[in-house]
Amino acid sequence: MPAAVAAVVLLSAAVGCSSPDATASVVVPSPPAEEAALCQALAKELPDTVAGLERSDPEPGSELTAGWGDGAIVLRCGVPRPEKMSDPKSQGVSANGVRWMLERREGDGPRFTSVYRKTYVEVSLDARYAHDAGPLTDLAGPVERTVPCALEPECE
C-alpha cells in the first residue's frame, strides 16, 4: 500500500507542475549600462500582439526580455554578439528597415539577431515559424525607433 500512495503523490506532483498556461523561461541578458538603456526604451515600444499572438512575457520578468504566445516568440535585448555572425556564409533577412542574421536551430524554429545596431536584439521563434520570418515585421519598427544603427550606411 505505501508504494501505491507514493505513486499517487508523485503523479499528483507531476500534474500540478504542468500548467497549460505556463510561460516560457529564458536567460536574461546582462548588457553594459548603455545597451541596457536602449533595451529599456525598446521594451516601452514593443507591441501587445505579434503575428496575432498576445503578449505573455517569459520568466523571470525583465525589461530585457519579452514574449508572445506563451513562448512561441521570445525577444531578448542586449545579448552577446553571436559567434555565427563572424561566418561569411551566414544568412540574413531584412524586415522593415532592420537587418537580421538567421540561425536555424535543430528541432526548433529559427533565431534571428539584429545586425548593425548598437545592441543585439535576438528573436527566437518556435517550430511553427520554421519557414516564416513574419513576426520580425511587427518587431522591426520598435527596434528601428529605439536601437540606433551602429554602421549608418548599412541601416538604410
Image (spheres, grey):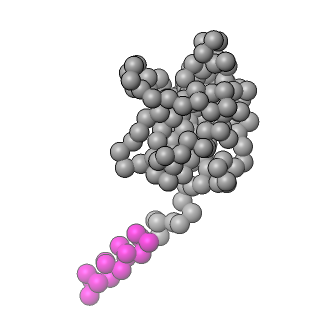
The quadrant of the picture occupied by the C terminus is: top right
Q: How many marks?
A: 0
Q: Is residue 4 magenta?
A: yes
Q: Is 6 above or below relative to 34? A: below
Q: Is 117 above or below relative to 55? A: above
Q: Residue furthest bottom?
A: 1
Residue occupying the point 47% across, 23% down: 81
Residue 29 appears in the picture as rendered: no
Residue 73's x, y, as percent?
56, 47
Residue 131's x, y, as percent?
49, 46
Residue 36's x, y, as percent?
62, 25
Residue occupying the point 47% across, 47% down: 130
- Classify residue 115 by image quadrant: top right
Q: Give left or right: position of 125 versus 41.
A: left
- The prevailing secondary structure element of the residues shown in magenta is helix
The quadrant of the picture occupied by the N terminus is: bottom left
Q: Give left or right: position of 140 versus 102.
A: right
Residue 106's x, y, as percent?
35, 45
Q: Is 29 above or below relative to 126? A: above
Please provide the residue range marked out in magenta.
1-15
Q: Is residue 73 magenta?
A: no
Residue occupying the point 46% across, 66% down: 18
Residue 68 appears in the picture as rendered: yes
Q: Is 70 above or below relative to 85? A: below
